[in-house]
């Protein structure tokens, strides 16, 4: 994985990893321990899972938007390079120095 020069994007990537791990742990525990159908704990677990999924989606959207703005095409064939929108790509990243 490439290191991020933008600390906000690095933070979001770390949050995605952390939240995915927590989600995996919750979902695994639900099947390992089991849930009573209408228990309060089951309701809290569902709310926590929904909240984690929402946070993951938000962070993924921020990272994806950043990558669309700063990434250049990965392939080098003529067709792909000819169709790339180079006017949106800045070699220095998001800074204007």
Image (spheres, helix red, strand yellow):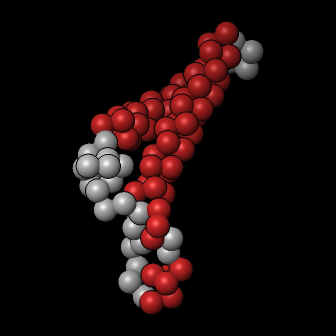
List x then y, in percent, for residue 68.
Answer: 48, 57
36 vs 27, left or right, is right
List x then y, in percent, for residue 22.
Answer: 45, 30
Q: Residue at x 41, y 63 (%)?
A: 89
In the image, farthest residue toward the front: 97
83 vs 50, left or right, is left
In the image, farthest residue toward the right: 38
The image quarter in which residue 16 lies: top left
In the image, residue 17 sits, relative to residue 72, either above or below, namely above
List x then y, in percent, for residue 50.
Answer: 63, 28
- Choose between 74 and 21: the one closer to the eye: 74
Quarter of the image containing the N terminus? bottom left
User: Taking the image as drawn, is residue 72 in sight?
Assistant: yes
Q: Residue at x 67, y 9 (%)?
A: 40
Q: Residue at x 65, y 23 (%)?
A: 46
List x then y, in percent, for residue 36.
Answer: 68, 18
In the image, residue 46 sits, relative to residue 79, either above or below, namely above
Q: How many marks?
A: 0
- Choose between 39 and 64: the one closer to the eye: 64
- Choose between 85 and 7: the one closer to the eye: 85
34 vs 80, left or right, is right
In the image, farthest residue toward the top: 40
In the image, residue 33 sits, relative to residue 14, either above or below, namely above
User: Taking the image as drawn, is residue 32 in sight?
Assistant: no
Q: Residue at x 46, y 55 (%)?
A: 69
57 vs 3, left or right, is right
């Amino acid at each position: 994985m490439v290191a991020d020069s933008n600390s906000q994007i690095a933070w979001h990537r770390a949050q995605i990893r952390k939240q995915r791990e927590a989600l995996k742990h919750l979902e695994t525990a639900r099947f390992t321990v089991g849930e009573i159908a209408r228990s309060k704990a089951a309701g809290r677990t569902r709310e926590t899972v929904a909240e984690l999924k929402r946070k993951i989606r938000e962070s993924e959207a921020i990272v994806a938007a950043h990558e669309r703005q700063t990434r250049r095409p990965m392939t080098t064939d003529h067709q792909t390079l000819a169709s790339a929108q180079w006017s949106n790509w800045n070699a220095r990243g998001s800074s204007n120095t």
